[in-house]
Amino acid sequence: AKTRGRSRYEFFDVGLRRRMQRRLRLEQDLRDAVRHGRLWTAYQPVVDLSTDRVVAVEALLRWNHPIHGPVSPTEFIPLAEESDLINLLGAHMLRETTRELGIRRERGTEVDLKINLSTRQLDDPALVTAVEHALAAAGLPPSALCLEITESALMRDFVLASETLTALRELGVRLAIDDFGTGYSSLAQLQRLTLDTLKIDRSFVNGLGRSRDAEAIVTSIIAMAHAVELTVVAEGVENGEQLELLRELGCDQAQGYYLGRPLPARELWA
Ligand code: C2E
Ligand code: CA
Ligand code: CA
Ligand code: CA
């Protein structure tokens, strides 16, 4: 029994070591990728449901690893968040996407920009100035930028987050609560944050047309958001049935593969 216990322990140890090695390697590679500008941005259109026009694009980071191929941001963002890398990455993202949008706007494409922010970025006091500078350099009005923060991130660091958010708000930048419905925020907290937009998490949109519960949840989220005058965006719309239901339920905007996949700027605006 003793030997078995020991070998099991060693087996666990090897697995753990491997995972740690992949993480270390990825973190190292990510650092290089940021430094050498090998990350790129995909843009996904956001459609206004009353006009059927594209009113904004959401910037989503992409990383093609030379060996592992595409690594999902759900894997590399948390990695970057464990070190100072997230601030480097965030700053790069901010500069690149505002510049891109500035160029598009000069060419007559009047769309807004949505960027995702992580908690670590909200902790950084330099964020507000970085945002201000990026907008000025790109010639964008602050109201053209919407920063998305997940519900769970907002609730984790409530007070601190809201201080940075207030400063951003004073700049004139718009704020969105992302992945709404997965956390436990109250209507009172939502109101206090003075947000502009609420994004309904994909998991609820996914159930539309298939589950009465999903429809009830989406209905009440929209009612709640509208009660505190937030614009409601549904994410992850994958078919026409979901889109029509969202329209009937009074949802303001939508995005998803059905409306447009995330694409490189040169393909989206080809
Ligand atoms: P998110 O902010 O909720 O972004 C939406 C995710 O849903 C994106 O995944 C997008 O590609 C995907 N998506 C869009 N439409 C559909 C659809 O119809 N069906 C399905 N199944 N998926 C759809 P992606 O690009 O893999 O990004 C995952 C997450 O990584 C994002 O979730 C966001 O939280 C984070 N992320 C991405 N880029 C950045 C960034 O620049 N900074 C930070 N802090 N986080 C980022
Ligand atoms: Ca988002
Ligand atoms: Ca989301
Ligand atoms: Ca998400």
Image: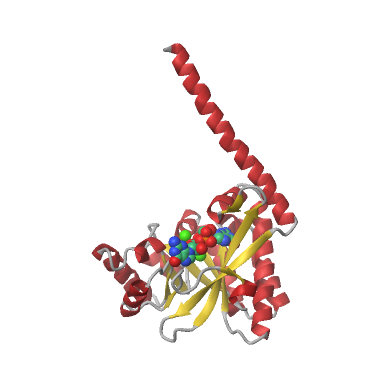
Whether residue 72 sits left or right of residue 66 in the image: it is: left
Whole-percent x, y for residue 91 in the image: 68, 62
Q: Is residue 161 visible?
A: no
Looking at the picture, does residue 145 appear above or below residue 15? below
Q: Residue at x 59, y 79 (%)?
A: 144
Quadrant of the image occupied by residue 223? bottom left
How far across and down, in percent of the image, does residue 169 sit? 56, 72
Left or right of residue 218: residue 101: right
Which residue appears farthest toward the right when viewing the image? 36
Residue 222, visible in the rendered structure: yes
Vertical position of residue 233 compared to residue 9: above or below:
below
State the image quarter where residue 50 is shown.
Answer: bottom left
Residue sticking out furthest to the top: 2
| Quarter that holds the N terminus | top left
Of the pair 46 and 136, the residue shown nearer to us: 46
**Taking 144 as reference, is 205 above or below it?**
above
Residue at 67%, 79% in the rendered image:
102
Of residue 9 and residue 198, the one placed in the foreground of this image is 9
Residue 216 falls in image quadrant? bottom left
The count of marks equals 0
- x, y percentage for residue 51? 44, 86
At 63% from the left and 55% from the top, the residue drawn is: 64
Residue at position x 61%, y 42% from top?
Answer: 23
Counting from the top left corner in percent of width and height, residue 143 is at 58, 79
Q: Furthest-left residue in view?
A: 212
Q: Is residue 136 left or right of residue 121?
A: right
